[in-house]
Image (cartoon, grey):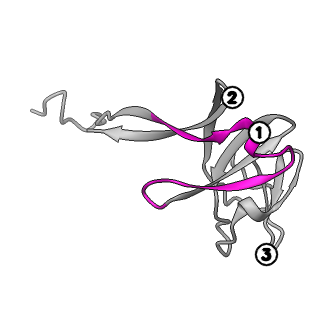
Amino acid sequence: MESERNGPDYREERVVEREKIAVGAVGDLPVGRGATVELSNGDELALYNVGGQFFAVENFCPHRGAPLAEGILCEYTVECILHGWQFDVRTGKCLTTDADIRAYEVEIEDGQINILIDAKVD
């Protein structure tokens, strides 16, 4: 007989903590612009200022790896500079194909921009 913990319907749950990464002051990123944010593990995110709201997504287009922080930003859509793939910076949803990218929560605290990154804990 299988125990409840290791039975076929048991799903291991992992506690997810969020790490707050301070990336700069609100005034450092002008409205309508994007910037590259490098994390301590070497990963890169693209950070955008859309009308005073800040959004962060993975920095590289899944098509050919172009940096999305250098893309063309039009309201909530960024267009890859290589082949025109478009992404919603609020959700990471690809508007061109089904190749979505990850979006990250951004908080503003005392004039500082913070990106919340999930950190899995076993």
Question: What residue appears at the point 32 percent right and 35 percent down from the top-left corner?
Answer: 14
Q: CA distance from mark 2 to mark 3?
A: 34 Å
Q: Is residue 90 visible?
A: no
Q: Is residue 26 magenta?
A: yes
Give the amino acid type for the residue marked by disc 1 in the picture.
Gly
Q: Is residue 80 left or right of residue 74?
A: left
Residue 27 bears which disc, if any?
Answer: 1
Q: Farthest residue toward the left?
A: 1
Q: Along the polypeptide, which appears first: circle 3 or circle 1? A: 1
Residue where numbered disc 3 is placed: 82
Q: Nearer the viewer, residue 10 or 88?
A: 88
Return the x and y of residue 18 as percentages of the image width and height.
45, 33
**Mark 2 in CB contact with mark 3 (< 8 angstroms):** no
What's the magenta region?
Answer: 19-42
Question: What residue appears at the point 40 percent right and 32 percent down from the top-left corner?
Answer: 17
Q: CA distance from mark 1 to mark 2?
A: 8 Å
Residue where numbered disc 2 is placed: 111
Give the amino acid type for the residue marked by disc 3 in the picture.
Leu
Q: Quick one: label 2, few (<14), some, or many (20+) residues within 10 Å?
A: few
